[in-house]
Amino acid sequence: MSDDITLGVASSNAQQSIDLSKYSLTSPVEVLHHLRGIVKQGQMVTVFSNKGKSFILTRILALDSDARTMVLDWGANEHANKMFLESERNIYVCSPAGVKTQFTTGKPRRIDYEGTPAFEVDVPELVIKLQRREFFRIPTPIANPVMCQLLDHPKGELAFPLADISLGGVALVLSTSQAGLLHAGELYQVSIDLKPHGVLLAQMEIRHLIPVQHKNGQETVRGGCCFTNMNTPRETLVQRYVANLERERRALVR
């Protein structure tokens, strides 16, 4: 993972990143307001440290608007905590109410907060708030998962279940032990069986890998990917599959 994480959205040129200035909060009032929303929701935040080589899952426990500092919960992994404390630049990623949010801070400080260890960092000067998705994403079935097969991985053909799919790309579900198999920026030829409509053969780019902690305590890694060579037949195949899933979802709701 690079020292910067770019929030990219697939478009007609999937290699282009969106203009992040449109999604950047720079006013101190706006930044604090958005961070307070994250605190209120109890949103889990992933912090990438040590140039992306280490991460912790944490929560923002408190904000001090006067001192412009915030307090983070102590992580469960002591080695990752140590890496975070030594890291000069750290990248935070979360999705409050489905709105992808990213910001950076400098080196944290260890403090005691309500009798327990915690981190203290300065409030960021800029927050990236991605307010919309370029393509409609729909979750894929859990009971009978759709598998994405990587046809040209150095370790041979690998297959991962999908979490969702759209015209722009897919989200892969990896176990924590599989996270090291993929890296942001890699390109793969893939095969995705979109039953009963057909098999999608496409190229996709790994855009980001984000740890996810589920309500049952299980941890997985979400691999966000975008298609890079879509054409009309491929888009039609995905559109038919997504439309079919949406019809089935609405039928279940009714």
Image: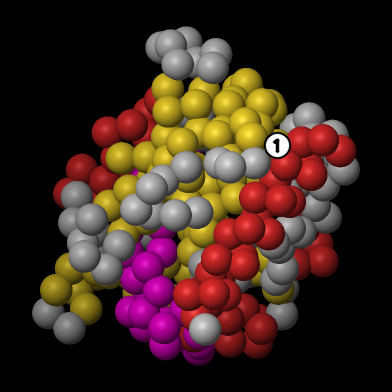
Q: Position of residue 119 (x, y in %)?
A: 30, 66
- Stretch in magenta: 37-66
Which residue is rendered at x = 82% and y = 35% of the image? 233
63 in the magenta segment:
yes
Would you place residue 196 above or below residue 240 in this image?
A: above
Question: Residue 78 placed where, x, y %?
Answer: 17, 49
Q: Nearer the viewer, residue 48 or 131?
A: 131
The kind of secondary structure element at disc 1 is: strand
Say whether residue 125 is left or right of residue 167. Answer: left
Viewer can see residue 110: no
Q: Amino acid at mark 1?
A: Phe
Bin the neighbour count of mark 1 within 10 Å (Cα to Cα): few under 14, some 14-19, many 20 and up. many
Q: Nearer the viewer, residue 46 or 146?
A: 146
In the image, residue 214 above or below residue 235: below
Asked whether 50 falls inside the magenta stretch, the response is: yes
| Residue position marked by numbered label 1 in the rendering | 227
